[in-house]
Amino acid sequence: MPTLQRAQNRYDNIEFVFVNQSEAPSHAQRFLREQGIELDNVYYDFAGNSADKLGAYGLPATLFLMATAKCALAIWESFPRPDFAII
């Protein structure tokens, strides 16, 4: 998550959206606060509808979508190295 936070802060021409599934917002917000992570565009999906619509059937999942909503890259594990290429 720190990697994606840095990317969100650096690339204002890219829309970053974060979706938390199956947890109370207070639980997810507490986790982010305890980790010192501040993100814009955080949404909460109790029903898992976003996973069904995007085909994200494993957690954690990081999806890179094009403007057309077509998935350009999917990572089905914790986000890779902290120095990922987009940062």
Image: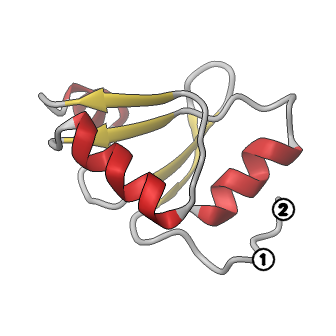
- Where residue 52 appears, x then y in whole percent? 23, 32
> From the viewer's perspective, is residue 15 above or below residue 83?
above
- State the residue at coordinates (15%, 42%): 22
- Where residue 85 appears, x then y in whole percent? 82, 68
How many callouts does the rendering have? 2
Q: Is residue 76 left or right of residue 35?
A: left
Kindly identify the amino acid type of the residue bearing the numbered disc 1.
Answer: Asp
SS for callout 2:
loop
SS for callout 1:
loop
- Closest to the observer: 44 or 72? 44
Measured Cα–Cα span from mark 2 to mark 1: 6 Å
The numbered mark at residue 87 is: 2
Q: Is residue 63 left or right of residue 82?
A: left
Kindly identify the amino acid type of the residue bearing the numbered disc 2.
Answer: Ile
- State the residue at coordinates (77%, 51%): 7
Q: Residue furthest top?
A: 68
- Closest to the observer: 26 or 52? 26
Labels 2 and 1 touching (C-beta < 8 A): yes
> From the viewer's perspective, is residue 86 above or below residue 50?
below
Q: Is residue 67 left or right of residue 35?
A: right
- Closest to the observer: 58 or 21? 21
Quarter containing the C terminus? bottom right
Quarter containing the N terminus? bottom right
The image quadrant of residue 53 is top left
The numbered mark at residue 60 is: none
- List the residue tagged with mark 1: 83
- Where residue 40 appears, x then y in whole percent? 60, 32
- Where residue 48 appears, x then y in whole percent? 18, 33
